[in-house]
Amino acid sequence: MRADAQRNRQRLVEVTIELVLEVGGEPTRDAVAQRAGVGIGTLYRHFPDQEALLHAAARHVLERSISDGENLVETVPDGVDSLRRYMHAALDNGIGAVNIIRPLLQKPDWPDLRIRAVTLMKRLVEGAERSGALRDDLSERDIVFALTRFARPLALGLPADEERALAHRHLDFYIDGLCVGPPKFTNSPSSGDGKNAD
């Protein structure tokens, strides 16, 4: 695929994720093409139907989030910090869009990614528990479902950047609440200082 075609495809996928989170549902193909700055024919050349577009968007989010998590497990020695950074990265990658897209797909299963995700979540939780700072009854499911809740759009009409900042802020509160002992409120780079999020 030519470089310009690859850029167009990538842009269409990223715009789809943005719009899914903004509208809280399935965006129109016209809206995707317009936001991406391409003609509708370009969209159809890359994604002949809506299923293909949504499938690519969901897979893109999952691949990025899993890859970020795998890198954090290998490079961040503190288990709680690694878990925190993973959850913040998944928010920034648009993980909330996967929840919205999944029911719209006929075959929403990605066995290769599922295996990697299960392994990653186990390593993240075990690493956090080994630190001794995290409650010992936390499960991988707890993390997955909590992230799902924080990542879903609030449907209150807030600007996207404000909604994202709130999600990061509340995620920090959640992780601090899981820790034994005094909280260590640590903002992710994208969450700002949290002072204006009230």
Image (spheres, rainbow, N blue to C red):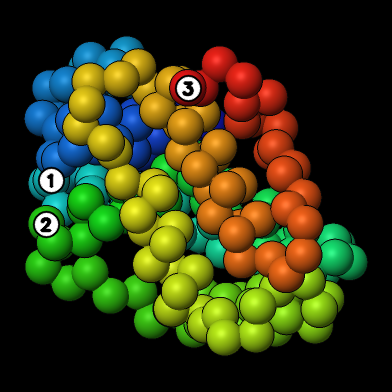
Q: Is residue 187 above or below residue 39?
A: below
- Is residue 72 shown to the viewer in this render? no
- Residue 55 lies left or right of residue 178; in this view the side is left
Local SS, label 2: helix
* Residue labelled with disc 2: 104
Circle 1: residue type: Gln
Local SS, label 1: helix
Residue at left offset 72%, top offset 44%: 185
Pinpoint residue 138: horizontal percent, then vertical percent: 56, 80
- For disc 2, the neighbor class at 10 Å (few under 14, some 14 to 19, many from 20) is some
Label 1 vs label 3, nearer the camera:
3
Pinpoint residue 102: horizontal percent, then vertical percent: 21, 61
**Closer to us: 147 or 3:** 147
Residue at left offset 73%, top offset 53%: 183
Mark 1 / mark 2, whichever is N-terminal: 1
Residue at left offset 77%, top offset 65%: 181
* Residue labelled with disc 1: 50
Mark 3 and mark 2: Cα distance apart in space: 34 Å
Local SS, label 3: loop
Circles 1 and 2: CB atoms closer than 8 Å = yes
Q: Which mark is residue 198?
A: 3
Mark 1 and mark 3: Cα distance apart in space: 38 Å
- For disc 1, the neighbor class at 10 Å (few under 14, some 14 to 19, many from 20) is some
Circle 2: residue type: Leu
